[in-house]
Image: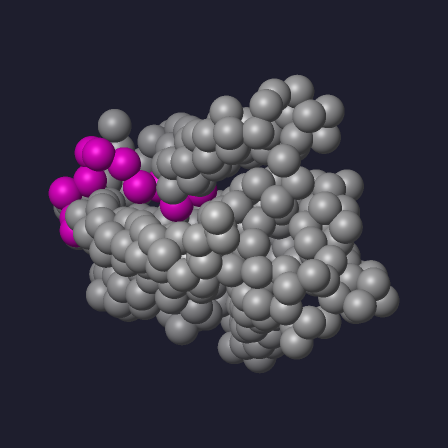
């Protein structure tokens, strides 16, 4: 199946990157352990949401608040950004040059920021309907779960900008490579969490 | 050094590997798109009754997660590393805690409901 032994999750640099490939093993695996603990955290917030979904206390519920078109656009944006980050990983691994690497990262960032824009617009329209976190148990749980994911995407975007800055300052060195590989895992992981959000929160809420 | 030349130094081999990995991402996004479109379409046109629609949404979500793990995160059964074991163990913990929470809270809600006055 593979020409080389796989050392860690995500795209492996391979032996053409020499010592950087060996350095990646422990670093990326450690980050993977963190991601799994983050998944546990998300799952508990999901459990909180599911147990409070009926607790609307006479306030607005999912049918009045969720906009399926907006959620669909957000889903496509995040999925496309996962793909473009994959292209950035390939540009890094096969040394297509810094310009192409930064180009794909920039596209990823634009898609991520567009996702956040749509999400904030959703929240604003919910607020205008009186759906604030303090309105009901359902809304508290909603604003615990969905913005937690949005906060992760915001953190990932800031991290991405920092890495582009590091590339500009130091070039594509070992630290930058390790950072990009960990951010790739983080970015793909957030897309997986989003699958759970659009299924459990939005689609299940609108059935 | 000799090993490195044999494994990674061969340009043709690397070119082939690059194409395979590129196709992996293309397959990933194509499958993920289909697995996204289907449940959104079902919900949008309300094509099914409630409970069976919920199970279909859940099934599509689980398959799409596996697709993301396989094609974007490159995790599979051929690996000898602990990555997959870690995912499976985390999933076990996650299922115990989530299912337990939902079970207990649903049971509590049922018991806390006042019985209807005769």
In the picture, the quarter occupied by the C terminus of chain A is top right
Query: What residue is rendered at 27% in x and 63% in y?
Result: A33
Q: Where is residue B42 in the image (x, y as percent from the top left)?
A: 64, 25
Q: Where is residue B40 in the image (x, y as percent from the top left)?
A: 65, 32
Q: Is the magenta stretch mostly helix, strand or loop?
A: loop
Left or right of B25 in this view: B98: left
Between A71 and B56, the residue placed more toward the observer is B56
Left or right of B21 in this view: A112: right
Q: Position of residue A138 (x, y in %)?
A: 59, 62
Q: Residue furthest top?
A: B47
Whether A71 is among the magenta residues is no
Left or right of B72 in this view: A32: left
Whether B78 is among the magenta residues is yes
Q: Where is residue A200 in the image (x, y as percent from the top left)?
A: 52, 46
Magenta part of the chain: B72-83
Query: What residue is rendered at 64% in x and 55% in y?
Result: A108
Instruction: Report which quarter residue A199 is drawn in.
Output: top right
Q: Is residue B53 above or below residue A63?
A: above
Q: In this view, does A114 lie above or below A11?
A: below
Between A40 and A9, the residue placed more toward the observer is A40
Q: Is residue A124 visible?
A: no
Query: What residue is rendered at 61% in x and 40% in y?
Result: A203
Q: In this view, does A70 lie above or below A119?
A: above
């Amino acid at each position: 199946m593979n020409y080389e032994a796989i050392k860690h999750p995500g795209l492996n640099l391979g032996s053409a990157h020499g010592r950087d490939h060996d350095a990646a093993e422990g670093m990326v695996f450690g980050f993977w352990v963190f991601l799994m603990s983050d998944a546990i955290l998300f799952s508990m917030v999901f459990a909180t949401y599911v147990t409070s979904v009926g607790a609307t206390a006479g306030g607005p519920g999912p049918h009045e608040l969720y906009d399926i078109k907006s959620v669909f656009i957000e889903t496509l944006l995040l999925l496309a950004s996962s793909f473009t980050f994959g292209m950035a990983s390939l540009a890094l691994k096969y040394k297509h040059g810094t310009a192409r690497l930064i180009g794909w990262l920039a596209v990823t960032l634009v898609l991520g920021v567009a996702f956040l824009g749509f999400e904030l617009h959703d929240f604003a329209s919910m607020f205008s309907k009186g759906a604030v976190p303090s309105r009901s148990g359902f809304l508290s749980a909603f604003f615990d779960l969905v913005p937690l994911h949005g906060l992760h995407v915001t953190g990932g975007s800031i991290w991405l900008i920092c890495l582009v800055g590091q590339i500009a300052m130091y070039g594509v060195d070992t630290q930058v490579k390790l950072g990009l590989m960990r951010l790739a895992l983080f970015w793909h992981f957030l897309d997986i969490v989003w699958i759970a959000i659009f299924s459990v929160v939005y689609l299940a809420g609108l059935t | 050094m000799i090993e490195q030349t044999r494994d990674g130094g061969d340009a043709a081999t690397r070119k082939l590997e690059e194409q395979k990995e590129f196709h992996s991402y293309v397959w990933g996004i194509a499958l993920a798109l289909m697995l996204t479109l289907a449940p959104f379409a079902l919900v949008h046109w309300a094509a099914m009754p409630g409970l069976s629609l919920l199970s279909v949404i859940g099934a599509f979500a689980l398959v799409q997660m596996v697709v993301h793990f396989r094609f974007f995160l490159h995790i599979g059964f051929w690996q000898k590393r602990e990555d997959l074991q870690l995912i499976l163990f985390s999933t076990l913990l996650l299922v115990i805690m989530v299912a337990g929470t939902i079970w207990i809270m649903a049971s509590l809600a049922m018991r806390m409901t006042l019985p209807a006055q005769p």
